């Protein structure tokens, strides 16, 4: 009788507790699925906010301080090569000269226009202004390519060869991402094509109205590859950054044109969207049960197909050489996914990881080494 009584007591106590915990997890999951939609799925082509203010400008040095009351610009105090822009002028920030309590003095090179004390500005990873000519004095053409949902834009920098590189930017980035290496490609006599894809300003929207992390965007890359083949491409290198890396890998897994790929270059590729979300949740200290609930709710509410966004499971189907670059301090895409990818096909992947380096920033920290990697890798196929 005592055992029955104790069992009833446990049931009466446990059941409300279980219900309460379930409601907490469901409520937290619903809230975090909203965050997931806003920060992960929703289209964002707007430039970042101005986070810093210029207080002094000299010929080869600039003093910059964080604007109070806005998001912290972490890169201001990281001694690497960054771009700085006020939307009218553009420059490069180099090594840190001096750090004061409220400001940072850095090496500076003006590339376009001029800056004045009091200007508000933003930093970026591109470190070059706007387009191939502004950045490197490279002539280029802007074209439109027929793709499944409509025309997509592209830059082409021509070379006197049948070697082509097609470059694919990441989420919320744009074609500017390619400016770090298109001059190197030109030096190698490689035609470069830098593409937009669905949901970019110069491309049609996706059917879902969300980023789809390579599950559909690969079709736009396929259209670009078909354009290159029609233009005489015999050697094709695919270059993908962040989500663009996921697009490249899924293209290689799914496209009937993938046999034309010579090799792939990836930096911080988004190879498993689920684990990328797990990383973001961990950074926000979201408990694992709430993260799981949020992901399940995102499937129902926003149509997220988590399995389709897992390219690691099929990594062994990749059959071309891959140069894979990833910063170990990446707080957006976990470096562990790149390591797992490399370990799955070690005979094809040349992996380079860099301590302390953040998301898609290896070039910014080590531009000479990055250039050397690109040139040696592509040069090995000529």
Image (tube, rainbow, N blue to C red):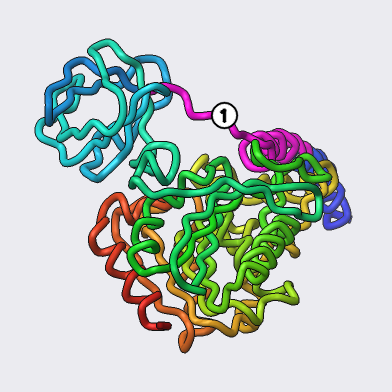
Main secondary-structure element of the magenta-colored stretch: helix
Compare residues 321 and 311 and report the one nearer the observer. Answer: 321
Compared to 218, does 122 lie above or below? above
Q: Is residue 110 left or right of residue 261?
A: left
Q: Which residue is mark 1?
A: 46
- Element carrying mark 1: loop
Q: Per the image, is 176 magenta?
A: no
Q: Name the outermost residue toward the front.
A: 160
The residue positioned 69% from the left and 37% from the top of the image is 42
> Seen in the image, is 265 located left or right of residue 78?
right
Residue 80 higher or lower than 250, as above or below: above
Q: Quadrant of the N terminus?
A: bottom right
Residue 37 counted in the magenta span:
yes
Left or right of 34 on screen, residue 333: left
Horizontally, residue 247 falls left or right of residue 366, namely right
Residue 23 in the image, given as x and y percentages of width and height: 78, 37
Q: Quadrant of residue 127?
A: top left
Q: How many marks?
A: 1
């Amino acid at each position: 009788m005592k055992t029955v009584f104790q069992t009833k007591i446990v049931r009466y106590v446990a059941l409300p507790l279980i219900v309460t915990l379930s409601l907490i997890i469901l409520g937290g999951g619903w809230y975090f699925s909203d965050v997931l939609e806003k920060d992960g799925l929703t289209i964002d082509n707007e430039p970042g906010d101005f986070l810093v203010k210029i207080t002094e400008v000299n010929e080869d040095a600039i003093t910059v301080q964080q604007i109070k009351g806005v998001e912290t610009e972490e890169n201001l105090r990281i001694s690497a090569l960054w771009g700085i822009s006020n939307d009218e002028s553009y420059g490069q920030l180099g090594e840190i000269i001096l750090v004061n309590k409220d400001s940072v003095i850095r090496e500076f090179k003006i590339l376009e226009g001029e800056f004045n004390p009091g200007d508000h500005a933003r930093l970026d990873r591109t470190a070059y202004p706007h387009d191939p000519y502004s950045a490197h004095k490279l002539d280029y053409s802007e074209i439109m390519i027929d793709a499944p949902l409509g025309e997509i834009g592209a830059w082409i920098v021509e070379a006197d060869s049948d070697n082509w590189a097609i470059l694919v930017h990441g989420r919320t980035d744009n074609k500017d991402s390619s400016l770090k290496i298109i001059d190197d490609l030109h030096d190698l006599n490689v035609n470069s094509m830098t593409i937009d894809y669905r949901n970019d300003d110069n491309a049609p929207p996706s059917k879902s109205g969300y980023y789809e992390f390579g599950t559909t965007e690969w079709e736009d890359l396929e259209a670009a590859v078909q354009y290159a083949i029609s233009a005489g491409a015999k050697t094709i290198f695919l270059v993908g950054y962040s989500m663009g890396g996921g697009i490249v890998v899924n293209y290689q897994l799914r496209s009937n044109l993938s046999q034309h790929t010579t090799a792939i270059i990836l930096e911080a590729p988004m190879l498993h969207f689920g684990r990328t979300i797990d990383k973001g949740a961990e950074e926000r200290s979201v408990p694992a049960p709430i993260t799981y609930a949020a992901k399940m709710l995102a499937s129902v509410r926003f149509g997220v197909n988590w399995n389709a966004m897992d390219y690691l499971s099929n990594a062994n189907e990749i059959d071309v050489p891959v140069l894979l670059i990833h910063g170990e301090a990446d707080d957006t895409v976990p470096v562990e996914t790149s390591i797992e990818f490399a370990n799955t096909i070690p005979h094809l992947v040349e992996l380079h990881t860099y301590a302390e380096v953040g998301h898609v920033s290896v070039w910014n920290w080590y531009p000479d080494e990055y250039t050397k990697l690109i040139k040696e890798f592509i040069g090995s196929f000529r």
